[in-house]
Amino acid sequence: MTRILVLGGNSFPFHAIDERRAQFEAALAGYDVTVTTDRDALTGDYDVLVDYLTDSTLTDEQLSALLDHVEAGGGYVGVHCAADLQSTAAADPDDLLDVREEPFPELRELVGGHFLTHPEQAEFGVDIVADHPITDGVDDFSVFDEPYQVTADDDVQVLARMDHPDLEDYPVVWTNESAGAVAYISIGHTDEALEDESFRRLLTNAVEWAA
């Protein structure tokens, strides 16, 4: 059975993995799923990492283990906040977060893009723009979520794009095969998105592809 490591954190209440544990477990039913905040789990055995970290600060050992995992053919699926490669836990307890000047470079290269900003949560469309195992069985759909404005490298394969009345058609789903079996899905903030059947199909398809 495919072993899925879902890694997140609880430092930021708006992305607390403990509040989303049941939804990830339901979405990935049928797999051997471990949902954890323990970043040392990156040094263990798993087939696919589902990354839901906001603060992507890793030790040298943890980062090396992740990169070695992908280089050896292991899978990586980033969801939503995984592309936020500049936010870190605040040094000042009165602040919510700190922001790095630049994304974590090794993770930026791995993901093939990164989060820029977002407006308020809204209903918007997700248009499937490429035939791929990750989009198999998924038609264009609408979702109420946090519309992530992202930048992606020219060599990623964009599989779905945003249809938002006030924004350009930002990528929503892509693969970065130059780095390995790497995929990213930008939606996944709200309960509505995490429980949406199209999102769940994209996630399980991405896990199958990355495995």
Image: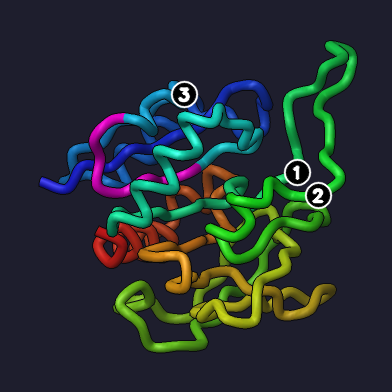
Which residue: 43% across, 62% down?
182
Q: CA distance from mark 3 to mark 2?
A: 24 Å
Q: Residue furthest left?
A: 1
- The residue under label 2 is which amino acid type? Glu
Res 210 → quadrant: bottom left
Crowd rating for badge 2 (residues with CA inside 10 Å; few <14, some 14–19, many 20+)? few
Residue ID for mark 2: 102
Residue ID for mark 3: 37
Quick check: 175 above or below 81? below
In the image: residue 136, left or right of residue 39 = left
Q: Position of residue 143 (x, y in %)?
A: 57, 63
Q: Position of residue 177 (x, y in %)?
A: 43, 72
Tag 2 secondary structure: loop
What's drawn in magenta, residue-wise?
44-51
Numbered circles on residues, count: 3
Quick check: 85 above or below 163? above
Res 98 → quadrant: top right
Residue ID for mark 1: 86
Tag 3 secondary structure: loop
- The residue under label 1 is which amino acid type? Gln
Quick check: 117 above or below 162? above
